[in-house]
Image (tube, helix red, strand yellow):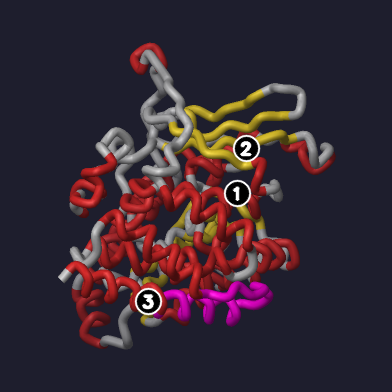
Amino acid sequence: MTQGLTVLGATGSIGASTLDVVARHPDRYSVFALTAHRAADALLALCLRHAARYAVLSGLPEDQGLRRRFAEAGCRTELLFGAGALEEVAADRECDVLVAAIVGAAGLAPTLAGARAGKRLLLANKEALVMAGPLFMRTVREHGATLLPIDSEHNAVFQCLPRIAARASPDAVRRILLTASGGPFRLTPIERLSQVTPEEACAHPNWVMGRKISVDSATMMNKGLEVIEARWLFDVAPERIEVLVHSQSIIHSLVEFADGSVIAQLSNPDMRVPIAHALGYPERIESGAAPLDLAAIGQLSFERPDRQRFPCLGLAYAALREGGTAPAVLNAANEVAVAAFLEGRLRYTAIPRVIEQALERASATQADGLETVLEADRSARRAAADCVAMLMGKAA
């Protein structure tokens, strides 16, 4: 009997990698639901290819014309609309496995719905833990959900931690080392960073990713968000989570133990590897990724991140230390700033300025409920938008 799979964010890069792995194992998985924000044509093509029971366009209102287009294309998938439909398919009893791959804050509510329904959660939406880490982890525990990370770094840490960790001393893990490629501007003269374009920022040297996450990789905010995610996933104090620049993107993370042992997970930079691990866990299944040839690679190099070049990393650590709703403010302000940069309204070097000002204007409160977190998110977006407008006015 196959497992019913729902992919939130099916038209993105994680969705594509997930469906590629799933197609290799038709005896294990069937596609229950696929979702997208507004990409109707791309979603229709996926539904025809994978015979999904349901499709959701979360960013569109009811549209009978789109329903006719799906039907006329020979698609038997039932088309749903609106953000509420995301939560419906995430919690449906016929959904066994939920792949949470929506980028940004929009993925929080449906991922929480899947956790409340006790699903097997394959988590790529790091914002769920960044914005509401304690709330999210409590929901997972209370409703018996199974949480498996598919970010390459967190999946690597999960693989490095022994399964007997629950019986080990909390001090058994000395450090978690999250690796970062350094992005496209690792060696760019700092004085030129104010002139870089969105196209340059999205040209990642190792990974194929969406535009927003590519910019986050360039600023290293992505790694800052991953530090916050790791703190909640693995219940490790922030000071035990470090970032290490590893430009080859072969070692995806490392765990150092109290006895001095360090265990690392290595693979080619291909998201199908962590996705296949989480889909098959505790078994191992074929991913389609190329075998790793260390002799051909030759060398693996490491360096500490330059905090002057990557100020967003320091902002993320500061928000994590402040706690409460501060990480939600950090995430919201970053989303606004990155969107403005991608639209040509903000310089690349102004992204951390917007985030810092939003954090300074916000008063962090306890993140004890979903509405509290969402209100912090909304308030931070308004503050960040004001900051963007002010900086644009100065530039003019």
Evaluate if marks 2 and 1 touch, with contact meaning CB atoms under 8 Å apart: yes
Compared to residue 76, the image places residue 16 above or below, namely above
Residue in front for this viewpoint, 98 or 365: 365
Q: What element carries label 1?
A: helix
Kindly identify which residue carries mark 2: 176
From the top left corner, tell me how far across and down residue 220 is, in percent: 41, 47
Q: Residues within 10 Å of mark 2 (few under 14, many from 20)?
A: many
Kindly identify which residue carries mark 1: 230
Question: Viewer-nearest of labels 1 and 3?
Answer: 1
Principal SS element in the magenta part?
A: helix
**372 relative to 218 in the view: left or right:** right
Kindly identify which residue carries mark 3: 58
Residue in front for this viewpoint, 102 or 50: 102
Q: Is residue 74 visible?
A: no
Q: What stretch is highlighted in magenta?
A: 362-382
Q: Of the residues shown, which amino acid type is indicated by label 1?
A: Ala
- Quarter assignment of residue 340: bottom left
